[in-house]
Image (cartoon, rainbow, N blue to C red):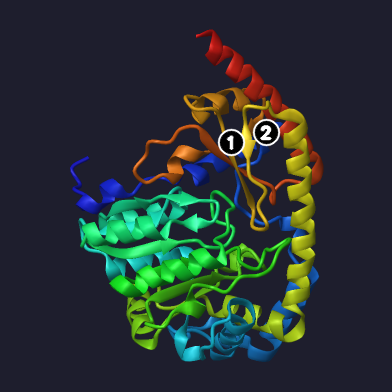
Amino acid sequence: MSIQFANRTEQMKASEIRESYKLMDVPGMISLSSGSPDPSLYPMDQVKQATMAVLDQYGTTALSYSATDGYDPLREKIAQRMWTKAQVRCSMENILIMSGSQQALEFSAKIFINEGDYIACETPSYMGAFNAFAPYLPKYASVPTDEFGMLPEELDKILAENKKVKMIYVIPNFQNPTGHTWSLERRKAFMEVVNKYEIPVIEDDPYGELRYEGEALPSLKSMDTKNLVIYAGSFSKILAPGYRVAWICAAPEIVEKYMFAKQGADLQAPSSAQLEVDMFMEMFDLDEHVKKICAAYKHKRDVMLQMMEENFPDCVTWNKPEGGLFIWVTLPEGINSKDILKVCLENRVMFVTGSMFYPNGGVENTFRLNFSWMNEEDIKEGIRRMGVAIKQALEMLQQK
């Protein structure tokens, strides 16, 4: 074909996770790879009532164009929720409605990154963010990270040595893929480094309300004294992902840049979806719904952990997340999780290999499990199959 594409399209690749959805159609396949909420937990009856109320009360308004910054009553509710859930005092002027938080990530690179600039991120980190950033041709400064979060002293060294770091991307709560949560001390130390260098921070928080145990911790945005943090929140994991209703919370001058980007991209988030989410919160108690799904996910997490304990070989280790949707698994050094996945697929069970979560590569012996998507019996059977497959794969690799 003679058509010439822009150079940036060379960086646009299919998401391995999204592509793996095709394997879910294989008969008998149990997928422990999805990062999606459990559809059986969607509040269908309440959503129906909210939808009908929107159509009855707002009619054609719900199906028409609306303001780019979003539906004001919804922005007001989000501003209130930022205080109760993230300890951030703000007004609706600090809130811009996004078409999913993935859009907020893409706009962040559009706004802050020139070709060759660096983005500092946790190691590992959300591969969907790398896909969103890729067309803007960034490089990555992978900051060493442990179970308590990004190591601030290492971030300090990187920022001191690399003046081309123009943005920092982090997921402090129940991180994707590891499920780790930053400690309070680590959050404070991180913000001290950020304030020292005055670099914008994207605080991605889609899982923050999905806490199953332990105390909620203040957001980075709540500690932001220099308006450097752009907080990205979403209704996808706490209500329904199909609405694609999310938001950023930032200083008005930063919100304005994102609004300009949005006007050029899709004009606005869908009017009907915004009105329906707002109506849901008018008519029903979203917090009660979140409690319900947290109880269900906690049970699924505990079932998966128990099955892993019973079925995985001793040489395999994993974490116990306090919330979120993921468990991070580490294989012995020298074992590539892609080799394990091949055998798992033969046994009709799948996971997400860990290598894709490292922007600069180099780590092959990890993988991510999800416990939210499948039902309890499929989790049990999936882990049984996976345990058998891991043992088979390790035996075959040892024989080579």
Question: What's under tag 1, amino acid-wise?
Answer: Leu
Q: Spatial distance from mark 2 to mark 1, Cα to Cα?
A: 7 Å
Residue 97 visible in this rendered orientation of the protein: no
Seen at 47% across and 42% down, the residue is: 16
Quadrant hosting residue 303: top right
Residue 142 coordinates in the image, percent (x, y): 36, 50
Q: Nearer the viewer, residue 5 or 294?
A: 294
Q: Is residue 81 above or below residue 156?
A: below
Residue 30 visible in this rendered orientation of the protein: yes
Q: At numbered mark 2, what does the secondary structure look like: helix, strand or loop? A: loop
Seen at 52% across and 75% down, the residue is: 270
Residue 168 coordinates in the image, percent (x, y): 36, 63
**Mark 2 or mark 1, earlier in chain:** 1
Q: Quadrant of the N terminus?
A: top left
Question: What's under tag 2, amino acid-wise?
Answer: Met
Q: Which residue is mark 2?
A: 29
Q: Is residue 330 above or below residue 372?
A: above
Mark on residue 284? none
Seen at 65% across and 23% down, the residue is: 389
The local crowd at label 2, few if under 14, some if 14 to 19, many if 20 or more residues have their Cα within 10 Å, is: some
Q: Nearer the viewer, residue 101 or 24?
A: 101
Q: Are marks 2 and 1 in contact (CB under 8 Å)?
A: yes
Seen at 74% across and 29% down, the residue is: 311
Q: Is residue 10 above or below residue 38?
A: above
Q: At numbered mark 1, what does the secondary structure look like: helix, strand or loop? A: helix
Q: Is residue 53 above or below residue 135?
A: below
Q: Which residue is mark 1?
A: 23
The local crowd at label 1, few if under 14, some if 14 to 19, many if 20 or more residues have their Cα within 10 Å, is: some
Q: Nearer the viewer, residue 275 or 107?
A: 107
- In this rendering, position of residue 3 left or right of residue 168: left
Residue 123 coordinates in the image, percent (x, y): 43, 49
Residue 34 coordinates in the image, percent (x, y): 60, 47
